[in-house]
Image: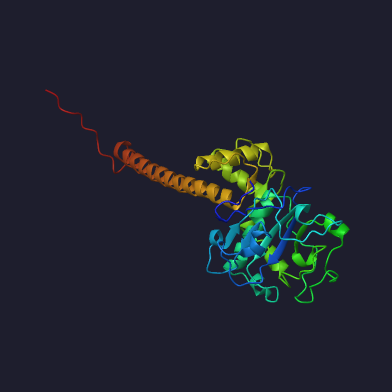
Amino acid sequence: MSWLPGVQRNPAPVTGGSFVGPVTIGVIHTTESSTFRPDDDSYFGHQSWPHVTFIPDDRLIYDDAVWQHIGLDVAARALQNRSGGVETNREGVVQIEVVARAADPSWSKGNGRGVRNFRRLMAEIEARTRIPHRCGVEFRPYPQSYGLKARQRMSGDQWETYRGWCGHQHVPENDHGDPGAVDIANLLAIDLEASMFCRLGDEGEAVEHWQLKLRDLGYYKNADIDGKYGPATAAAVLAARRATGSTVKSGDAITAHAKRQIDLLWTRWATDHAKAMQAHQRTTRQNERIQALERMHYEPGSENCVPHVPAITS
């Protein structure tokens, strides 16, 4: 899916064209402004669009903090691409513009809603691409990070083999120093929700968790809880999501949206199951009391025995 579910959409009139390879890099920019309005003359007259604009405001819920402009299956236009060098925008890069200034990376610190929203955004993008959840570069403070020859900037060869998250300051052929010294380790910290995201081909405890839930719901028919996200798990995910009314066509990933849908089904199931168990227990206790009373009433030799008196018939 090239468009993120639930977020604000502000489609760009132009894109960077097709990618030259799989999407394996995430690039973080800063807008060098404190506000963003989709109807203003943003991104240099609507020519240098990123895929997504992110507003790091703790007052905003995730859906209101994210604006998507370009689908994740085509290139954005926020990087310089000098003739005769490597591909930058089209290399297989998802680009995020954070509404902040490179000289003030405080938005990336702590564990407020803004940081949690950004973590979720990264996880949603990773679930739809091949970007690994890692960073192998140093984020330097601005303005030290500025310049074509700044020490943190990658060479063309390094760029073409890089996998993971980086900043505008790391991209070759570019002189920008944003997003500054962001706390990338904090942004990459895996919280419980993000750690539950997985996709076709993944293995581990997260997959096992969903297999168990889907089995409880009756959608995972495979007898083995093997922790492997294969066709059986994908089919179960698709069936469960469609049961909520979704029109998705694939169950190849557990995204945040899929997680909410399956969790909703499971919560309903667990509530109904608990009610059924309580009713069964009440019925069992009632039956046991009735049986005990019957034994006391009819068993010969019982001190509480009440003799049976035949009905008088005429």
> How many labels were placed on the picture?
0
Q: Which quadrant is the C terminus positioned in?
A: top left
Given residues 61 and 19, the one toward you in this image is 19
Which quadrant of the view contains residue 311? top left
Q: Is residue 290 above or below residue 170?
A: above
Q: Position of residue 63 (x, y in %)?
A: 54, 58
Q: Is residue 106 above or below residue 132?
A: below
Q: Is residue 3 above or below residue 294?
A: below
Outermost residue, left side: 314
The residue nearer to you, when weighing 286 against 36, is 36
Q: Residue 202, position in %: x, y? A: 71, 46
> Residue 67 vs residue 143: left or right?
left
Asked whether residue 195 appears in the rendered view, the answer is no
The quadrant holding residue 111 is bottom right
Q: Residue farthest to the top? A: 314
Q: Residue at x 66, y 68 (%)?
A: 31
The answer to whether one can see residue 117 in this image is yes
